[in-house]
Image (cartoon, rainbow, N blue to C red):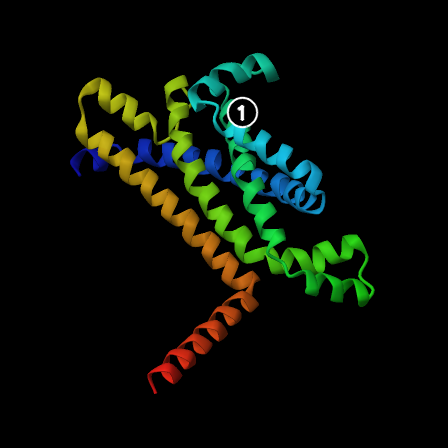
Amino acid sequence: MTWFQNNTDKVVDLLISHLWLSALPIVLGFVIAVPIGWYANRHRRVRGVLLSVAGIFYTIPSLAFFLVLPSIIGTGYLDPLNVVVALTVYAVAIMVRSATDAFESVSPAVLDAATAAGFASTGRAFRVELPLAGPVLVAGLRVVAVSSVSLVSVGALIGVSNLGSLFTEGYRTDNNAEILTGVFGIVIVALVFDALIVLAGRLLLPWARATRTTEARGLARLIGGGRA
């Protein structure tokens, strides 16, 4: 606790760095992956290929990816952009499968009804499929958020400042207080991101909560009827 009080400014700076290095890939990964998932669900012939490619990208070791990226995108080895690009790739790799499953979960009967009501393909995607796929998309985004917050810390090994820097520096100086501060800081950031995503999901998808409530009541009645 004494170490944290004496180094508050340093921890806050690393926290801010960790926040934006995590948030940007989460947002970019979501924006990129959702259209890909929608396309994969609509075109079954390429679905397997897209999901396989996404899986392959996710198997690339993060540290190796950080070191190889500068030669691919022309950045310096200490450029934070390397971390952002790598984590965006990982976010897309995770989110593509979630997005595909999300759009697949939309009832075909609902889609047929939307088409019969006069919705064009684009209008149906934005006004029908996307809202109904929302709960599954939110679940996938929560996984992406936790993964991104965790992987940002690996960037400290290549000199990109974030809360993971407290690990490397604490290990070098044998300072357990510094290491624990980094651990707790990353856990808190992950919990905050997760809470914000859940809150956003409840605000933007109120019908999902209503559906869960209706299902719970139906189950309760079924159980009650069975006992009677």
Residue at the top extreme, as displayed = 71
Q: Which residue is mark 1?
A: 81
Give above or below for 163 relative to 188.
Answer: above
Residue at the bottom extreme, as displayed = 228
Q: Nearer the viewer, residue 123 or 52?
A: 52
Q: Residue at x 48, y 72 (%)?
A: 215
Q: Residue at x 44, y 24 (%)?
A: 62
How far across and down, in percent of the image, does residue 36 sit? 66, 40
Q: Residue at x 50, y 20 (%)?
A: 79
Residue 134: in sight, yes or no?
yes
**The N terminus appears in which quarter of the rendering?**
top left
Q: Residue at x 70, y 38 (%)?
A: 45
Please indicate whether residue 202 sits to the left or right of residue 36 in the image: left
How far across and down, in percent of the image, does residue 223 sit? 38, 78
Amino acid under label 1?
Answer: Leu
Please indicate whether residue 199 sits to the left or right of residue 5 in the image: right
Mark 1 surroundings within 10 Å by alpha-carbon count, few (fewer than 14), some (14 through 19), many (20 or more): some
Please indicate whether residue 178 sits to the left or right of residue 163 in the image: left
How far across and down, in percent of the image, does residue 144 sit? 48, 41
Q: Secondary structure at mark 1?
A: helix
Give above or below for 157 relative to 123.
Answer: above
Counting labels gives 1
Image quarter of residue 15: top left
**The C terminus appears in which quarter of the rendering?**
bottom left
How far across and down, in percent of the image, does residue 34 sit? 63, 45
Residue 84: in sight, yes or no?
no
